[in-house]
Image (cartoon, rainbow, N blue to C red):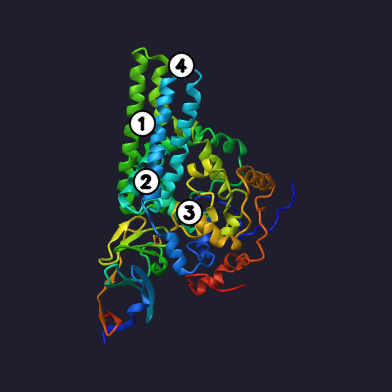
Amino acid sequence: MSRSTAPIGFEFSVRDYSLTGANTRQAIENGLSAAEWYHSEIPRKKLKLLMKRRDAPAIRDTVIWIALHFVFAAGGLYFWGSWLCVPFWFAYGVVYGSACDSRWHECGHGTAFRTRWMNDVVYHIASFQIMRNPVNWRWSHARHHTDTIIVGRDPEIAWIHPINLILKALAFVGIVETWISLKTLMRNAMANLSQEEKDYIPESQWHKAIFWARVHIAIYAAVLLISFVLLVSGAAWKSLIPILLIGGPRVYGCWHFVMTGLLQHGGLAENVLDHRLNSRTLYMNPISQWIYWNMNYHIEHHMFPMVPYYSLPALHEMIKDDLPPPNTSIWDGYKEMMGSVMKQRVDPNYAIRKTLPPTARPYRDHLHKAVPERNAGAVSSDRGGM
Amino acid sequence: MPWIDVCAIDDVEEEDVIRWDHEDRTYAIFRSVDDEFYCTDGLCTHEQVHLSDGLVMDYEIECPKHNGLFDYRSGKALRAPVCEDLQTYETRVGNGRVLVFIE
Ligand code: FES
């Protein structure tokens, strides 16, 4: 076993990813939680234009998204019994089980549509599709933005050390996650919130978490019941259709969102306060980018979460000279990420530190290296030079 | 003197917000689409982030950190993750200046 390198980010004595453990205390004591983060400079006038909300792009995309559900499901049903139905179910799985993740994400931020109720409706549909309690995950995602990849604070760290590659590979077929999600929804439906959920969800919202878990569980129970009735009435394989339509795509169609999601922070640093060190921006093919609603501009999204998905390419153009060079494709991103992950399996402190272009401001290592001193002076935005 | 002179009306663009620090507090001064001025506490009630970096849409301010939403006229919290309302302050305009009533 090789000797461990010094981490890029703040060094903890132990690594405990729970939200109530030793690292939680350490992160808070050392000012890594709710801290000041680096962001690229954009004049307010330009930023206001980028943040501007419109309904049209998300309505267009949502109409296409819903229509694709119907078209692919219709194809899958029409060709049922022949191999021709497979590509239709495959495509249905992706628009249901993968595109829902980015819809959940963007509508959870409230940035997809200008009209609030439209965000809320799509958020609830997508939360159901991805089997996430819409209340719990709204709060966990807020924490992910406050404390991105801060060990002990961020509930959404995908790459937990020591990295289990078998579990990561299984994530592409969603069986383990679906089982865990259903168990969590079931537990919440029985009015039981875990200590961690209680940590990041305010008490005033607990009853909502329980209500929505019950709604989700009731729908899944109805689907299973219909499937069972079909089976006992002699529908044979056709009794699977309700599950293929509702719930099943979380298993057989999730691979695309897992593929793109793992790239967001994989192989990068923990416990830093500069998103350029812990997030990845990459270019990808237009179909994946549409499914993913431009979240491939992930550094940009974390620096400016108010910019809606349809303005992220413009934001990228504006600040790319201050960011590490993007990966050129999903493949290129995986090559880089997996190279680092394999090293992290031996040395968890290892992380990629990309070379910044000469036009960029240097990485703000002082933000995470000197947090105690900085905390004494409660600064709210990063304006200073190195 | 409870009415405090804050800024010139042109210091705030239409449908926008600026930060105003006074004594040991920070406030947000809003100018609405219909040219009315409003004042609230300057920090989001969720995680103490300056609302002046946020986005004003109609009569709402969206927090720059987690997109929490407030009605800046009443201070009412409208969307999670904000649950607690903002404190608001009376404003008036005179001689091209914005004034806020601070007790
Ligand atoms: S800090 Fe304002 S919504 Fe979280």
Tell me the SS state at disc 3. Answer: helix
Residue B46: which quarter of the image? bottom left
- Residue that extends furthest to the right in the rendered view of this protein: A2
- Who comes first in sequence, dot 2 or dot 3? 2
The chain holding disc 4 is: A
- Who comes first in sequence, dot 1 or dot 4? 4
Q: Quadrant of ligand 1?
A: bottom left
Report which residue position mark 1 lands on. A220
Q: Does label 4 lie on the same chain as label 1?
A: yes
Q: Which amino acid type is marked by label 1?
A: Tyr
Residue B14: % across, % down: 33, 70
Q: CA distance from mark 2 to mark 3?
A: 27 Å
Q: CA distance from mark 4 to mark 2?
A: 35 Å
The chain holding disc 2 is: A
Report which residue position mark 2 lands on. A59
The circle on residue A81 is 4
Report which residue position mark 3 lands on. A144
Question: Mark 4 or 3, which is nearer the eye?
Answer: 4
The quarter in which the N terminus of chain B is drawn is bottom left
Question: Mark 4 or 2, which is nearer the eye?
Answer: 2
Tell me the SS state at disc 1. Answer: helix
Question: Mark 1 or 2, which is nearer the eye?
Answer: 2
- What residue is rendered at 57% in x and 45% in y? A284
